[in-house]
Amino acid sequence: MKASLRNDRIALGLLVALLGLVALAFLAPWIAPHDPNAQNISDRLSGPAAKYWLGTDSLGRDLFTRLLFGARLSLSIGIATALFSLVIGTITGALAGYYRGWTDRILTGFIDFFSIFPSLLLAILFSLLFGRGVAGIFLSIGIVAWVQHARLVRAQVMQASEQPYIEAARALGVSNFRILRQHVLPNLWGPILVSVSAQIPSNIMAESFLSFLGLGLQPPHASWGTLASEGSRALRSHPHLLAFPSVALFVVLLASQYLGDWLRDRVSGQGRLGAVD
Amino acid sequence: MLELSLKRLLHSLLVLSLLMMAVFFLVRFAPGGPFDTDRVLPAEVQLQIERRYGLDAPITHQFGRWAWASLSGDLGTSFQHPDRSVSEILSTALPHSLALGGIALLAALLIGVPLGIYSGASRNALWDRWIRLILLSSVSLPGFLVASLLVWLFSIQLSWLPPALWEGPSHWILPAFTLMLRPMALITRLMRGSVMDVLGQDYIRTAHAKGLSRDAVLWRHALRNAWIPCIGLLGPVAAHLLTGSFLVETLFQIPGMGRYFVSAVLNRDYPLVMGTTLVFGLLLVLFNAATELLLAWADPRLRTRSSP
């Protein structure tokens, strides 16, 4: 796996860029040149320059600093929602797929519900209930993403538990829980990892989409979506306010989707990109 | 087959009505109401407003009333636009959205399908790598970046096209392009994979072996099977067009369903949220049923299968 990463120079470059961005986001409070909320009215709406690397917004706040803090928020929502899916979705998917019965009936009910409406529409409706704070957006996106992951795990577990070696284990008198934990799930880490890693970019995208429309995080919070939304109001005169956050978002999405596809190709052992999201 | 589709359609409609019930309760239990103001209203004024809009009845009662009325096409009155009924708003907004979505879908198919065929059939590794990167980029581009770039370039810098509104063909180009980009990338990607898959199969080798030209093999033998998986993509594409329309209609100020939905959610305009959600759900259910029929027509192998 390491050797093939070294051979694919695009994947390697994108991985380095992505890790660099994550590190910058993590270190934001220590390396940011300004305070993200400090307003400097006399310097408002200045373009990129030595003092403010990427310029300032309409309240004179440093855009570079706000981008770093925005990265913290956007990336953490993307990663946290994916972890939420990983834990809840894997457990319920595995239980439903292995035991069938009432867990399965409830889960397939959920899946039916969620398969009519696109996930962003549902996330918007959930955000009405959970509110537009960080926790509310996390829940709205996480709840929708969770079902998609559970559906995949359920199908995989169902398929795996019909294999002869599982039957053999059952015949030997191994308990169901142990079969699930030691014989079924260890073989599924590949697809599970692929599904969860594919959720990170789509959840980051969902957050920025909601925030841009004003349906997600609200302005005192700086995420890439809210920064782009603020920037879009000054498109005519100060396009850099929209350009920098959107480009940051684009780079992260491109890198993580490329690496996600790369991972999927490695795990499934096929070298093509034909599968649908 | 027809009976099966009908059964599935009925099932979807049942799920949709349960979903509407869930949305109704969700919206009502949401914190904050449409008439919340910074001032505290006197209790009697509050009560009067609630009575005027039927918000004082028990919630199950409210849902029953909504469901019964909606069957006869009465979706209540919008909170934001007190002079217009929800059905009236929806009936003026729907044609705009259908036109926008239709143009975008057509464009996505007209560009995506040939591009996918071409890149799937060509065996040039360098070109192949580039097309992968381009497709991935167009999936990763945030819609608001595309829209803003287009407006900045074509409306602000060059003044060739109007930056907003929905008044004639010149107004359609920028929003339709923004909306089309992602579905187009999905279609190209799937078509490309499907063509590559089919070209690797035995019957294609047979066709080559009996001396057919490459073009004849591709067009007469490979594509007949290769385009079928694309029908299955129409559902996800419709979902993309729908959620994409929230952004595109808001940014370009197109008076369609997506824009009304966003503003209704922002302003907690319950009747309008319910009305738009219901129409979205019906559209998606019908669209999916139509895709299923199309799929069964295109691929006889699927007709006998009992589940999708």
Image: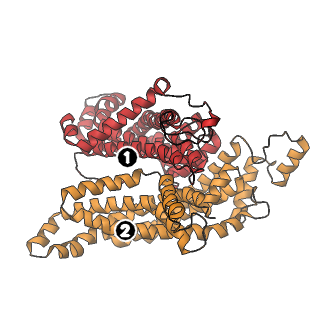
Chain colours: A red, B orange
Query: Which secondary structure lies at badge 1?
Result: helix
Quadrant of residue B306 within the rendered picture: bottom left
Q: Amino acid at mark 1?
A: Leu
Is the residue at mark 2 from the same chain as the one at mark 1?
no
User: Residue A236 appears at what percent x and percent y?
Assistant: 57, 54
- Image quadrant where residue B79 sits: bottom right
Q: Which mark is residue B111?
A: 2
Q: Is residue A275 visible?
A: no
Residue at point 29% right, 53% down? A273
Residue at 42 percent across and 63 percent down: it is: B234
Chain of the residue displaying label 1:
A
Answer whether residue B198 is visible to the viewer in this image. Answer: yes
Name the one closer to the observer, A28 or B89.
Answer: A28
Taking A239 as reference, is A167 left or right?
left
In percent of width and height, residue A21 lies at 40, 34
The residue at the point 71 percent across, 52 percent down is B270
**A108 to B197, vertically: above or below:** above
Question: Horizontally, is A9 left or right of A143 in the view?
Answer: left
**Residue identified by numbered label 1:** A254
Measure the C-alpha gap from mark 2 to mark 1: 22 Å
